[in-house]
Amino acid sequence: PACFSQYFWWIAQQFPISRNLQIVGIAAICWALWKIQNRACFEQKLIRSPAEIICYACAFLRYWAGLQSGVDKTNLLAGVAALQAEAQVP
């Protein structure tokens, strides 16, 4: 997606989840990018694969899922599983 409106349209086609969970997903990806950028800048540790970004995002989502209950928790964990599955496709 080239912008947030395209992201929201695309993610709604992939996963029938609430707008709040869509925002949590993009926040996890942005947070992962920020952390990886800081690691590169301050610790001189570069990523070896773009899949590392997905792994970071999945870790945040798993943690945040633990703070949720019911359907939101289930949907976040399903999103983590889907992201990990996509990251492993060669």
Image (spheres, rainbow, N blue to C red):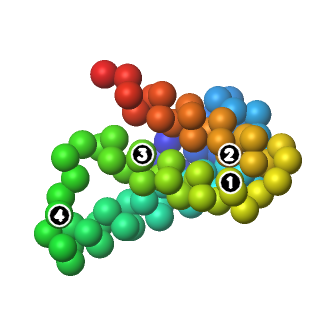
Crowd tier of the residue under label 3, counting other residues whose Cα lies within 10 Å: few below 14, some 14–19, many 20 or above: many
Using the rendered image of the protein, determine whether residue 1 is visible from the camera's viewpoint. yes
- For the residues marked 4 and 1, what is the alpha-carbon distance in whole angstroms? 28 Å
Element at label 1: helix
Q: Is residue 82 left or right of residue 70?
A: left
Q: Nearer the viewer, mark 1 or mark 3?
A: 1
Say which residue label 3 marks.
54
Q: Which residue is mark 2?
A: 76
Is tag 1's residue or tag 3's residue first in the polypeptide sequence?
3
* Amino acid type assigned to the residue bearing label 3 in the image: Ile
Q: In the rendered image, which residue does mark 4 sit on? A: 45
Kind of residue at disc 4: Lys
Image point (34%, 41%), residue name: 51
Residue at which label 1 appears: 65
Q: CA distance from mark 4 to mark 3?
A: 17 Å
Q: Are marks 2 and 3 in contact (CB under 8 Å)?
A: no
Q: Can you say whether 86 is above or below 47 in the image? A: above
Cα distance, mark 1 to mark 3? 16 Å
Position of 32 with respect to 77 (left or right) is: left
Residue 7, x across and y down, in percent: 58, 44
Q: Is residue 89 left or right of residue 63?
A: left
Residue with the most extreme bottom position: 42
Point out residue 71 in the picture as x, y percentages from the top left corner.
Answer: 83, 43
Element assignment for label 3: helix
Answer yes or no: do the residues labelled 1 and 2 have beta carbons within 8 Å? yes
